[in-house]
Image (tube, helix red, strand yellow):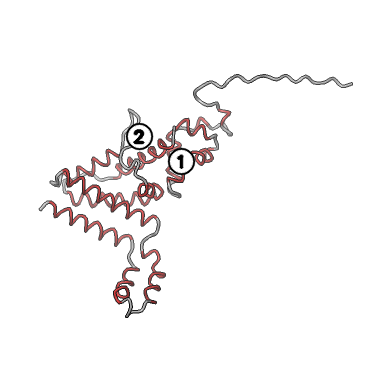
Amino acid sequence: MAKQATVQTVEESPRPRGRPRKTDSAIGSEAELTKSAIIDKAIALARQMPLSDISMVQLAREFDVAPGLIHYYIGNRDNLISGVLNYYYGDRVRRLPALTGHWRNDVEKMANVLLAHATDHPGIAQYIASHNRFRLFQQVGGNETDYGVVYFDYVAQAFLQGGFKPKQVALAFHLLMQFLVASSTAQASRQLPADHKEFIKAKFEELDSAKYPAAKKVGVPFSSLDSKQAFEAGLKLLLDGFAQWLK
């Protein structure tokens, strides 16, 4: 008769608090995981999809680790969003030219830089357009810089150096940001008429001139409007309006 094997069970000791074990990662890649690496991955994903759609679970899949590890390094979702936006504003600030004291030229150059930057990060631009949290102030640690504030200070200085009053600067900042958010969102989501030119033009051509005379006249040039035309014309109207305040 065969001798029966003895199975010895060993009770696993309780998990200690603190850093998760390497074995919690399917491929043992925890050493590669840092807060910075996770933020970088979220930024890369936001070039292809809205930031609001990026979850902790998705990031865990990207790194092939347990979701708990993402929470360990990042904390909660607000920390993730704020971390991405703080990087975004920091990158934006680094692209901005030095102020010259000529407010209109400075603001015009700044606006073009901001539009190009938002176009590079459509998922983040769309998030800013639809969410109010972290548009300005970020959740940063004691040794970290809040680049939302740095960015605000830059824009405020551009107007103050031109002789605008603080209340005027506050309103100018708000109006300019609203315009830039709308412009970047329209460009990222292909909402400009020129993006659908042939369809729009054909629809206007089908209209009855007697019934819709104004629409018939305006329809064709409307169908050709692209992002460059809309942005340059809108920015000029804003800057012309701001210039009137100084008079």
**Residue 143 appears at what percent x and percent y?**
33, 28
**Mark before the other along the chain sequence, 2 or 1:** 1
- 220 over 128 or under it: above or below: below
Residue beneath disc 2: 139
Residue behind mark 1 = 41
SS class of the residue under badge 1? helix
The amino acid beneath tag 2 is Gln
Number of marks in picture: 2
The reply, left or right, for residue 32 in relation to residue 243 is right
Q: Is residue 203 left or right of residue 175?
A: right
* Residue for point 72% across, 19% down: 8
Q: Position of residue 24 (x, y in %)?
A: 57, 30
- Residue drawn at x 39%, y 77% is 206
Q: Amino acid at mark 1?
A: Lys
**Category of crowding for the residue at label 1, using alpha-carbon neighbours closer than 10 angstroms: few (below 14), some (14–19), many (at least 20):** some
Residue 140 vertical position relative to residue 154 in the rendered view, above or below: above
Q: Return the residue found at the far front.
A: 211
Q: Disc 2 to disc 1, how far (Cα)?
A: 19 Å
Q: Quadrant of residue 196?
A: bottom left
Frontmost residue, 189 versus 154: 189
When asked about the image quadrant of residue 98, the answer is top left
- Please tell me the numbered disc located at residue 134: none
Cβ–Cβ under 8 Å for marks 2 and 1: no
- Residue 40 place in picture, x, y as percent: 43, 40
